[in-house]
């Protein structure tokens, strides 16, 4: 039986590729974007199989209305893809309060509104799959991406919690963590030339040059291949809670997690001291006996 998808951020990039792959195999899609003009070609190509919806995910009322409309139009939703978002670029010192708030409003609050709107229907039917688009930046932090990374790290925690809360209802959750993917020009996008840029402080110019140089050395992923990979995930009886799209994630996370584990180990004596028991490691799996 074909699946019904609800996909945010469908106008371009990975979101557009996901929509096209789902439609091409006979699924139905409620595709959202800030403007439905960007979805006109889909409507012409796939007719009633696609429901174009204008949506700004920061508008909670509009999110709930769009989900209801999709459910009424198709009868149900099987797959929710939280893809809408953008990258706010800038050193922590450069960020304005509004830039940080806007980043969280879109990337975090917008995703939460979609989940809250879709969950009642998914719970009632006892099945469904929520796909949260995160990033390699959701598990590894790099300079000049503090606002974006903060939003993605928040989504990682929210969706790990969500997975535990909804498993009993038959609802699955997968967090997809892509690396760099090619733009329409076939190139890996420069993170400092895409997204939203804070007002530049010359003190960080050298750092910006180094980050831009690193980005140019990274291979660009193919969005069409990522879309086919996502189809395999939504068709799986036992999908992963987390999955990298692209090879870069595995390479970066190995070193990052090794460094974290080593730091915690190096300071474990102080950790024990902080609990009031010098020289003794706390064992969270074995509670202290209670005297009676």
Image (cartoon, grey):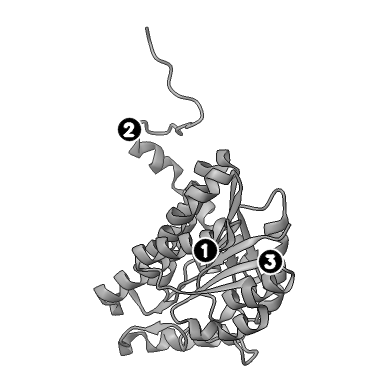
What separation in Å lies between label 3 and label 2 (alpha carbons)? 58 Å
Between residue 203 and residue 192, name the one nearer to us. 192
Residue 68, above or below 203: above
- Contact between marks 3 and 2 (CB within 8 A): the answer is no
- Mark 3 or 2, closer to the camera: 3
> SS class of the residue under badge 2?
loop
- Picture disc at residue 276: 2
- Mark 2 or 1, closer to the camera: 1
- The residue sitting at the left extreme is 97
> SS class of the residue under badge 3?
loop
| Quarter of the picture holding the C terminus | top left
At 37% from the left and 62% from the top, the residue drawn is 109
Mark 1 closeness class: few <14, some 14–19, many ≥20 residues within 10 Å: many
- Of the image marks 3 and 2, the number of the one nearer the N terminus: 3
Mark 3 closeness class: few <14, some 14–19, many ≥20 residues within 10 Å: some
Q: Is residue 284 left or right of residue 229?
A: left
- Could you tell me if residue 281 is visible in this image? yes
Between residue 289 and residue 59, name the one nearer to us. 59
At 67% from the left and 60% from the top, the residue drawn is 3
Mark 2 closeness class: few <14, some 14–19, many ≥20 residues within 10 Å: few
> SS class of the residue under badge 1?
helix
Q: Is residue 1 left or right of residue 33?
A: right
- Contact between marks 2 and 1 (CB within 8 A): the answer is no
For label 1, the residue is 70
For label 3, the residue is 27
At 51% from the left and 68% from the top, the residue drawn is 137
- Could you tell me if residue 146 is visible in this image? no
Where is residue 84 shown, x and y percent of the image? 48, 71
- Of the image marks 2 and 1, the number of the one nearer the N terminus: 1
What separation in Å lies between label 2 and label 1 (alpha carbons)? 55 Å
């Amino acid at each position: 039986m074909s699946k019904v998808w609800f996909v945010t951020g469908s106008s371009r990039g990975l979101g557009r590729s996901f929509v096209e792959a789902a439609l091409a195999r006979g699924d139905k899609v409620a595709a959202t974007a800030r403007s439905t003009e960007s979805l006109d070609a889909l409507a012409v190509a796939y007719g009633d199989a696609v429901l174009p919806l204008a949506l700004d995910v920061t508008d909670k009322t509009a999110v709930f209305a769009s989900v209801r409309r999709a459910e009424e139009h198709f009868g149900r939703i099987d797959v929710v893809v939280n893809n809408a978002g953008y990258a706010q670029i800038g050193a922590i010192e450069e960020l304005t309060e509004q830039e940080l708030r806007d980043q969280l409003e879109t990337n975090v609050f917008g995703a939460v509104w979609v989940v809250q709107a879709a969950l009642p229907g998914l719970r009632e039917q006892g099945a469904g799959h929520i796909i949260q688009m995160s990033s390699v930046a959701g598990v590894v932090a790099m300079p000049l991406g503090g606002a974006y990374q903060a939003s993605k790290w928040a989504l990682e925690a929210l969706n790990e919690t969500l997975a535990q809360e909804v498993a009993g209802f038959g609802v699955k959750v997968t967090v997809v963590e892509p690396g760099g993917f090619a733009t329409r020009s076939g190139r890996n996008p420069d993170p400092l030339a895409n997204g939203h840029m804070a007002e530049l402080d010359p003190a960080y110019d050298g750092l910006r040059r180094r980050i831009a140089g690193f980005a140019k050395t990274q291979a660009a992923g193919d969005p069409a291949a990522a879309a086919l990979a996502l189809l395999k995930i939504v068709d799986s009886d036992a999908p992963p809670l987390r999955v990298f799209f692209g090879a870069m994630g595995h390479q970066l996370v190995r070193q990052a997690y090794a460094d974290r584990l080593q730091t915690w180990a190096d300071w474990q004596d102080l950790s024990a001291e902080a609990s009031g028991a010098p020289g003794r490691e706390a064992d969270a799996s074995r509670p202290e006996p209670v005297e009676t």
